[in-house]
Image (cartoon, helix red, strand yellow):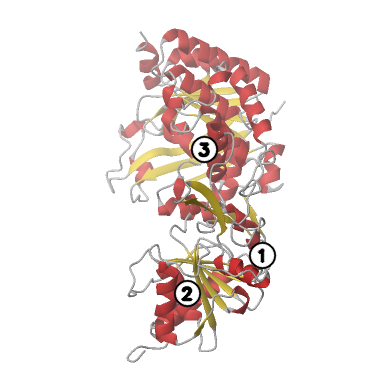
Amino acid sequence: MKGYNFGFLDEASKREIRRKILKAIAVPGYQVPFSSRELPIARGWGTGGIQITLSLIGPNDVLKVIDQGCDESVNAVNIKKFINAVTNVKITTDTTKASIIQTRHRIPEEKMNENQILVLQVPYPEALRVFEPSEFETRRMHAEADYSRMWLYLYEDIVTYREISIGARYPVMVNKRYIMDPSPIPRWDIKKLNMAETLYIFGAGREKRIYAIPPYTSVEPLEFEDFQFRVENFMGEKCILCGSDDTFLDEIIDDSKGKRIYMCSDTSYCNKLLISKKVLYKR
Amino acid sequence: MHIQPIVELKNLTKIYGKGCNLCVENTGPEHETNICVNCNSLVACGNVSFELYPGETLGIVGESGSGKSSLLKLLNFDIEPTLGEFYINHEKINTFVGNEKVNLFNLNSFQKRLIKNHIIGIVYQYPYLGLRMKISAGGNIAENLIMAEWRNIEKIRKKISELFEKTELPIDRMDEQPEKFSGGMQQRVQIAKALSNNPIILLLDEITNGLDVSVQARILDLIRNLHWQHNLSIIIVSHDLSVIRVLTQRTIVMKYGRIVEVGLTDQILEDPQHPYTQLLVNSQL
């Protein structure tokens, strides 16, 4: 796009964000403050992720953007269009072909490798915020690894509901040091964070924080010995399109029949399966 | 025979304000103030030194503003001292700070938290200082257990039940918030919480304030039983001389942030030496 620097942000801003990313990678799970820049999108709409992507992207990168697993949702499409307009990079929907994937609320079903980076958009970077409103206090807790109140929060949850009621944003312990908010990904995706080959970078534009999970880092969901972490159970339901029963499914109400139907949340993976099964996928 | 004290406190000074070289000199009972005329700082505690012996119950008396509560808060690391040394002589402490005798005030906040959680139990004057009112009574106790690396809900709840029984609290109310409890029950929850990790030192700050006499008597009874059962060393702050008489063997009298008299409780109550102590004893209803 004429009149703009490659990747929209000026080089000094990119350098600052890259430095903060390096720091985040050096201290896995630690939230690094950064000077979130103005973008042509309001803060809180993926600006953390966009700034990370724009600072990392080069002319030879291949970009994929998803929103809750979907390549075609409004947020994903607009971010894709914007980044393409300011960088001219190739865009793909294929998880395996992308070098950078920006995502909101999901991690793709297909296994990612060492040459890929997953950029996650984060609304609330502070996992401890649910019980502690003071930033001063939460920072102190992180610094001293004083996490008993996080565990107490889980204890109270178990006492009240007989299980831990957190769905998305399930708190995890990174590298046995920092408790981290994994962004609102479902529990289903939490296990993909542990000892992954891929670099995960988390960006919160409104809250001005960047944090990361480098490849091959231990990431453990918080659990008690007798109340272990478990993922969503779809009770044997299958994707109505591709027939998968081993993916994270979205529950949708079929308006014409008034019944629940289930579909893969990761649309590109679902499409791929359909093509490989030679099933014609009609919209 | 020489008995090694379990707690040694040396020259503890806490100054609020910017402080100056003359603060300690300018204040105290002989000046009848705890505010330094030179720099206007407030001396909450000045050169306070004492020992606590194993199994002993030590009373601290004094009027409001004499530095009693500040002293307990300093011992519980709730506030930082301006000067002073604090030692605890017990093998349990070596796990956290090593075998060398170290001034506990110089530890980092992580080590202080370990000591607070494993060695010291505290019961505050006001339950809202020691308890999270919106979190279940059991949860308040669970917090201490969690801090001591307990990660099994069933075991945690069993331990909470034991503590509830010991402190005469109804076990079937352990999942209710303490804000729904009576004052006496709230104090019991605080006591149960203080005992959760088998402390060796118990700090009690005016624990019977605002309770009616029958409840007061039962709380004091409870403290006395726990003292024997757990071989605790107790420091109890009170301005109620009858509480001091019932519970303690030795007493410290404080005024304007200084210790003005130390002695056996009987001696202090029957034959007070310092004019202030005489006034205190004679003012009893």
Q: Quadrant of the N terminus of chain A?
A: bottom left
Mark nearer the viewer, 3 or 2: 2
Frontmost of labels 1 and 2 is: 2
Q: Residue A217 carries which label?
A: 1
- Residue A52: numbered disc: 2
Callout count: 3
Determine crowd level at label 2: few under 14, some 14-19, many 20+ residues with C-alpha closer than 10 A.
many
Q: Amino acid type of disc 3? A: Asn
x then y, percent, for residue B83: 47, 47
Q: What residue type is labelled 1?
A: Thr
Q: Which of A138 and B37 is in front in this view?
A: A138
**Under tag 2, what secondary structure?**
helix
Disc sitting over residue B24 in the figure: none
Specify the label residue B76 is tagged with: 3
Image coordinates for residue A251, horizontal then vertical, percent: 52, 51
Q: Which of B120 and B174 is in front in this view?
A: B174
Q: Which residue is drawn at 42% across and 88% down?
A: A6
Does residue A265 sit above or below B223 in this rendering?
below
Q: Residue furthest bottom?
A: A2
